[in-house]
Image (cartoon, grey):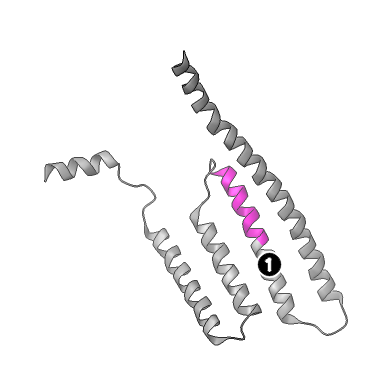
Amino acid sequence: MEKVEWKISLKIIPKVLQWFLNFCLIVLALIMSFLLIIEIIDFIKIIVSAGKRDFKLFLANILIFFLYFEFITMIVKYFKEDYHFPLRYFLYIGITAMIRLIIVDHEHPTDTLIYSLVILILIVSYFIINITPLERPKRSLFFNKKEEQ
């Protein structure tokens, strides 16, 4: 009897955790959507203001906008692809974040060089992901070939 209850609880726990994760992601997406709207309002304020225009600030706000947008898109993809985060979206977010850092904080040349190298590594990673086949060979086939040799 205890064995049956243990198996049932092992099936229920992942479902409860999945529901909790989904709820938290929906709340996070709503908060990010709200912040995205605030960024749009900030864009309008920067454009309408008649004073000195700070293009660095405007560009930094655009990149923050894209970061929010990419995170929301990643959450949408998570639900569309049966609870799976595509790795390429993390790479997009990383590249955008590094570009924002270069634009906002470019006073130290060594930091800018390091940020550029990080972007290069992320782009190479994206290239490797695109040329790698989506399906992996089954493990049993690999072991069978190894045993034959």
Magenta-highlighted residues: 68-81
Q: Position of residue 141 (x, y in %)?
A: 24, 41
Residue at the farthest left position: 149
Q: Residue 10 in magenta? A: no
* Residue 17 picture location, percent across and down: 58, 36
Residue 138 % position (x, y): 30, 41
Q: Which amino acid does the dot numbered 1 rest on?
A: Ile
Q: Is residue 82 left or right of residue 19?
A: left
Tell me the residue at 77%/82% (across/down). Answer: 54
Dividing the picture into quarters, in which one does residue 20 lie? top right
Residue at x-position 67% and y-position 60%:
68
Residue 72 drawn in magenta: yes
Q: Tell me if residue 106 comes above or below residue 86 in the rendering.
A: below
What is the secondary structure assignment of the residue under circle 1? helix
The quadrant holding residue 58 is: bottom right
Q: Which residue is mark 1?
A: 64
